[in-house]
Image: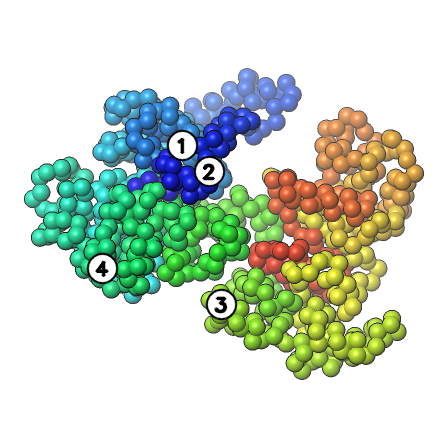
Amino acid sequence: MRASWARPWREDAVDRTRITEEEALEFHASGRPGKFEIQATKPLTTQRELSLAYSPGVAVPCLRINEDESKAYDYTAKGNIVAIISNGTAVLGLGDLGAQAAKPVMEGKAVLFKRFADVDGIDLEVDTRDVDEFVNCVRFLGKSWGGVNLEDIKAPECFIIEARLKELMDIPVFHDDQHGTAIITAAGFINALALTGRQMADVKVVINGAGAAGIACAELIKAMGVPHNSVMLCDTKGVIYQGREQGMNQWKSAHAVDTQARSLAEAMAGADVCMGLSVKGAFSAEMIRSMADQPIIFAMANPDPEITPEEVAGLRDDAIVATGRSDYPNQINNVLGFPYIFRGALDVRASTINMEMKIAAAQALAELAREDVPDEVAQAYDSKAMRYGRNYIIPAPFDPRLIVAVPKAVAQAAMDSGVARRPLDDIGTYEQQLSARLDPTASSLQRIFDTVRQNPKRVVFAEGEEERTIRAALAFQQAGYGKPVLVGREEHVRATMKSIGLEHSNLEIHNARLSKDNARYVDYLYGRLGRLGSLRRDCQRMANQNRNVFAACMVACGEADAMVTGLTRSFGVAYDDIRRAIDPKRGQRVFGMSIMVLRGRSIFIADTSVHELPNAQQLADIAVQAAEEARSMGHEPRVALLSYSNFGNPWHPAAQRIRDAVQELDLREPGFEYDGEMQANVALDYEVMQEHYPVSRLSGPANVLVMPGLHSANITAKLIQQAGGGSVIGPILIGLAKPAQVVQLGATVNDLVTAAALAAYEAESEVGGS
């Protein structure tokens, strides 16, 4: 069995994923050949920087490391580098292709390490089939890395190599084909037992396939509590039983059991669980029929499982089935394990990856599968409905919560078992650091979310009948941010909740037409709009039929602290609805601000939503309020008022209002850095600014960009969102007297939760400031 992220090359496998041989070759050959490159993490543009990076500056850390080798983790990248090492003797199930042909796979593994856990992987292809030569090559290079991931090495050599390297080296050595597969399998195994009401100590397990992965699975589930004699390991010659001599070795012998069963069919009779790490068709219909009630079937051969889920369904309707295939539920996918396991091990400088750490990883994965699945995950899998149950016992590989759940568990197990050489001081801080590695918005929002948790608010979700809205409301509540209120027809909301498995959730629902507060809201609206062309019946219609208006009235009249909407309507429509009930803050402009969170850098862009062509006064107001918002999120604002020109070069009358806005700010003395008019590249590149425009008042690159018009602001934000490689928060609606946020059409559950939390934070800020 091979890790399911990389399948054997077969035409039927390729056809299933609609990838041709030509496309695969073009992908790897186009542009810069291969799949990754090495980039410097320090600036190397000047001679001084080069001198610091190499001679003579490099001598200083060399001497420190010579005095104390552990300083290599402080002054080099060792602590974030894993060597991905293979001799190519078992490539993807294709067999012995040799070291050179293994390189594309090892590069792919490096990409996955980076993509999923921000671990730098370096591929090494060792051109030898001799165990001693291989071991010596790795051990003598071992000072270079923080860990070793062995890959695509055939059995039994893989057992010998791993065991010897673990003895010789003081860093984690992990053969993913064995332990990665075992850990993911064990996670599904835990949940399958729970769903069928079984206990570890009482199950009968059959494992077909006595290679690296099969033996590792047997070892792990035994360590978790399955009795030795309850696990029957089978190979091509049948059951591995006590006294058998044919086809045995020391690794198989360790799992021999006292049994009268000799064939796979005999072993399967009455079994609770069967795990296939073998070949297509190994599990026959008769074998499946002979298993116990509610059988658990893990058919993990790739690309074709030992038996397909369709075949099992035709035989019995009480089975839980997992495979290695992404086109079936319950995919046993190694990418759920190795990036995060190494992340946790590296972060505590573990000397090894022991059994305790493997079990912790499996349990963390099992627990994560039981939580509500984020909308981003469902979208990555064609919006398939996913919730814990017989068809969802293992988290999906693109679940963003994996980066926290698994490394945290592994790191804690390393500390508890005494193999961590740098224990963590605060597991909560570590969680935040993990989140920030792959989701840079997390670090910017953490303080806000913490404040909201400490001061939970009542937030109205206006589009309460929508599935994503319901799930966002539940996530908001479960996160401890406050009390969500759904606006919608209760029977429709309940039906949607039932269809997604959340019918038992305790969420408050308000029907606008039937609300006891409806008359009061009509009076409130008519008092505001009666002299602006609206009749009383118009206001009654708004309150009865327009959920945005009803939600805004709840907030305006004190029945809720904040609201969020926008999932199903354009920003303009949603904004106009809100403004019927909520005014701007006294002396402030209402505008939209988008936060672009790029790698290590946040940029605030305004106005991306409201003002089509703001005048100088409006631009100055927007600059002041945007700066305040940036400061409230922990950034010291440096505001650039953008144009197509730099300080009058080239001069054009159209840029005059930008210059006038700067003069308006001069009169106000707002207490933050600002300047303009300037082009975007100058505003963001401080070296260019210093070199060509030393008249600039900014002391560094701008982090708040005030755009000259709605067109340029909106286009810029959307363009960066789609092509910039960063994350986007917003647009955040700023300047209303009561907190309300409008998400973009088609927003995810996470977008809705973030908007609701920001609205709740604004409500708390108003309380704190009053």
Who comes first in sequence, dot 2 or dot 3? Answer: 2
Q: CA gap, disc 2 to disc 1?
A: 17 Å
Q: Report the residue marked by disc 3.
A: 499
> As rendered, which of 199 and 694 lies closer to the eye?
199
> As rendered, which of 266 and 363 lies closer to the eye?
266
Who comes first in sequence, dot 2 or dot 1? Answer: 2
Disc 1 residue crowd, few under 14, some 14–19, many 20+, Cα 10 Å = some
Residue at 74% over, 80% down:
520
Which of discs 3 and 4 lies nearer the camera? The answer is 4
Residue 699, position in %: x, y?
Answer: 75, 35
Examine the rendered structure and indicate whether residue 161 appears above or below residue 565. Answer: above
Residue at 82% over, 51% down:
612
Q: Residue 289 carries which label?
A: 4
Residue 277, position in %: x, y?
Answer: 27, 44
Examine the rendered structure and indicate whether residue 701 appears above or below residue 197. Answer: above
The amino acid at mark 4 is Arg
Which of discs 1 and 4 lies nearer the camera? The answer is 4
Q: CA gap, disc 1 to disc 4?
A: 38 Å
Q: Report the residue marked by disc 2.
A: 19
